Image (spheres, helix red, strand yellow):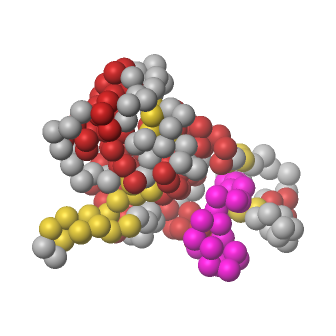
Amino acid sequence: MAGNGFGVGLYSPKVAARVARIRYRSFQAWAKANLVHGSHKPVGRAKTECIYSFNDLLLIRLIVRLKAQGAKPKQIKTALNTVELASNAEPHAWLQSTILYDAGAQVVVAILPGTPKWNPVAASKGPQTMAVIFFPELVKELKDELVPQARFPHIEIDPEVLGGAPVIKGTRISTRAIVSVIESGAKPRQAYPNLTDKQVTDAQAYEMFLVET
């Protein structure tokens, strides 16, 4: 479990593949096709591993949603590249956008705030119904999936806290930090005296849940 990076808001490729709801090998193909991006960290001599932030996982879930509605990977990649270009190379511009897939016209449409020329009515070639993807819904969906509340009532994920790392509710103490204390041979309650035994137990169980899945 050591070194998995979860304590700084970064997630392993296997967690990313689970979020994508595809086999790990298929996810690796996505990465090779440059459809999804992460950051590289060293894992040994001349070797690196790609790790993913909460925002990366959110983008992956968006891609899953668009693919389920019929969008092709090439269309999705082109749309995301266009959004980035239209926003002066802002890599996370899609977070402020509304992304739509028009099944009738078979196009992915993006609406950027303050950019009225990106008009979904014009792009849809008529009054066809378009499925709107709102990011607040995706954020909640992903948070609920990454942290099943019935199983881990003391753990939460907030994109604004530690970059989306899993933490003890209402704190900035990550589950990874607690397990790191245990792995060092110290007692978590000494390092974090305000925590309860149940919170510590939840943190340990959650880290195992991430590794196992």
Query: Residue 11: where, in percent of width, then height?
Result: 37, 51
Image height of 71 relative to 157, above or below: below
In-image side of 143 versus 82 (left or right) = left
**Which residue of the protein is positioned furthest toward the left in this rendering?**
45
* Of residues 123 and 198, the one drawn nearer to the viewer in this rendering: 198
Quadrant of the rendering where the N terminus is positioned: top left
* Of residues 146 and 67, the one drawn nearer to the viewer in this rendering: 146
In-image side of 41 versus 109 (left or right) = left
Quadrant of the rendering where the C terminus is positioned: top left
> Is residue 77 in view from this perspective?
yes
- Residue 156 among those drawn in magenta: no
Kindly identify the residue that appears in the image at 19 percent across and 64 percent down. Answer: 43
In-image side of 2 versus 103 (left or right) = left
Image height of 131 relative to 121, above or below: above
Query: Residue 73: where, in percent of width, then height?
Result: 49, 62
- Residue 97 among those drawn in magenta: yes
Query: Residue 19: where, in percent of width, then height?
Result: 42, 44
Query: Residue 6: where, in percent of width, then height?
Result: 35, 49
Kindly identify the residue that appears in the image at 24 percent across and 53 percent down. Answer: 3
Q: How many marks?
A: 0
Kindly identify the residue that appears in the image at 50 percent across and 54 percent down. Answer: 163
Image height of 149 relative to 89, above or below: above
Q: Which residues are magenta?
A: 81-102
> Is residue 63 in view from this perspective?
no
* Of residues 55 and 33, the one drawn nearer to the viewer in this rendering: 55
Kindly identify the residue that appears in the image at 43 percent across and 29 percent down. Answer: 194
